[in-house]
Amino acid sequence: MHRVFNFSSGPSALPLPVLEKAQKELCNYQQTGISVMEMSHRSSAYQEIMDETTSLLKELMEIPYNYQILFLPGGASLQFSMVPLNLLRKSKKADYIHTGSWSKKAIAEAKKYGEIRIAASSDEQQFREVPVLNKMVFDDEADYVHITVNNTIEGTCFHQIPHTGNVPLVADMSSNILSTYCDVSAFGIIYAGAQKNLGTAGVTIVLVREDLIGNAASDCPTMLDYQTHSKHRSLYNTPPSFSIYITKLVLEWLKEMGGVSAIESLNREKARLLYTFLDESKLFTSNVARNSRSLMNIPFTTDSDDLNQKFIEEAKAAGLVTLGGHRSVGGMRASIYNAMPLEGVQELVAFMSNFEMNNR
Ligand code: PMP
């Protein structure tokens, strides 16, 4: 079997033991004689998968008792609508922190439902850093504050979570969930598409503090109301059952790896290796401000588009794939989520170093 190191930003690399377990169980899941893909979502075997996934997530993220864990379809993008539809209930005002392409989409969607203020933005810095929020004053009348904690395309990240007082903080953690310790109680809602650190595309994990459920307007579509999914424990309709099963396998793998604290140390080591090389390199540069550097998505570039292209092609031939930057920014980007082993980053750095020597 020939596997390469896959630096894709999402859907992205899965741990090999997860793929192997899924393969082993594919045709006959735990002596049921059928695949999870063929299983009724109302069966006891499937309920067990849901329960185990929920309890593993609760354990690994230390989720407090007053949060519901929902498994929803529609990607993180659907949360751009569900959040305002469920939370814009009193003042119909919300504060958004604008840090790049994904926050832009979240803001555009929320504007359909209420008065949205850009409370802080790094637009003027071309999103090369995240705004400083420690002295930030949020509108205390706002129904919520929205933050994109890790900016997948720009390669920036908030390393400190702002205090928003009594105003619930809603966080898009699509590209950094479970990568470092997170105090869930600091948030009203946390959401993340599964296709980076949690499994495969199709399911979005939404953690909602219970007091934020049940406030949607009466004309809110049933499927977009958190209460529907909370009441039916994510089984109001057919859930993305196979994706949830893969999430279970990813969480089992993460627990075996030593949980969030162990993966955080590994993630910090991987990022340190790559940033140290970039800082010393005379060919490659990172445009992201040091205090805003993401541990998960690391964009870098040379000063020539032709050389970038050559790098991407030669890296691919060497078994280091999907290193092209997002189409909106160009250059290169290495996404090194939880499933990327240290050896993958070591090989990348060694390849970059050789490439630099040969292309000076
Ligand atoms: N937010 C962030 C931070 C993302 O990285 C992405 C996807 N790359 C999205 C939202 C959108 O996710 P989805 O494609 O699951 O709707």
Image (spheres, rainbow, N blue to C red):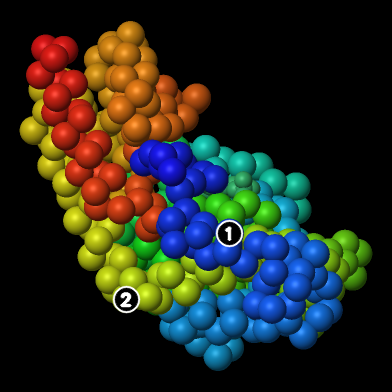
User: In this orientation, which residue lies closer to the viewer: 183 or 168?
Assistant: 183
Q: Secondary structure at mark 1?
A: helix
User: In this orientation, which residue lies closer to the viewer: 352 or 90?
Assistant: 352
Marks 2 and 1: in contact by CB < 8 Å?
Answer: no
Dividing the picture into quarters, in which one does residue 122 lie?
Answer: top left
Which label belongs to residue 267? Answer: none
Percent position of residue 118, x then y: 52, 48
* Amino acid type at mark 2: Gly
Pointer 1 residue: 23
Crowd around label 2: few <14 · some 14–19 · many ≥20 (10 Å): few
Note whether 109 is above or below 57 in the view shown.
Answer: above
Considering every residue shown, the one lying at the far bottom of the view is 65
Q: Is residue 165 visible?
A: no
Pointer 2 residue: 258
Dividing the picture into quarters, in which one does residue 93 lie?
Answer: bottom right
| Lateral position of residue 177 relative to residue 297, left or right | right
Which residue: 68% across, 83% down?
Answer: 48
Note whether 293 is above or below 51 in the view shown.
Answer: above
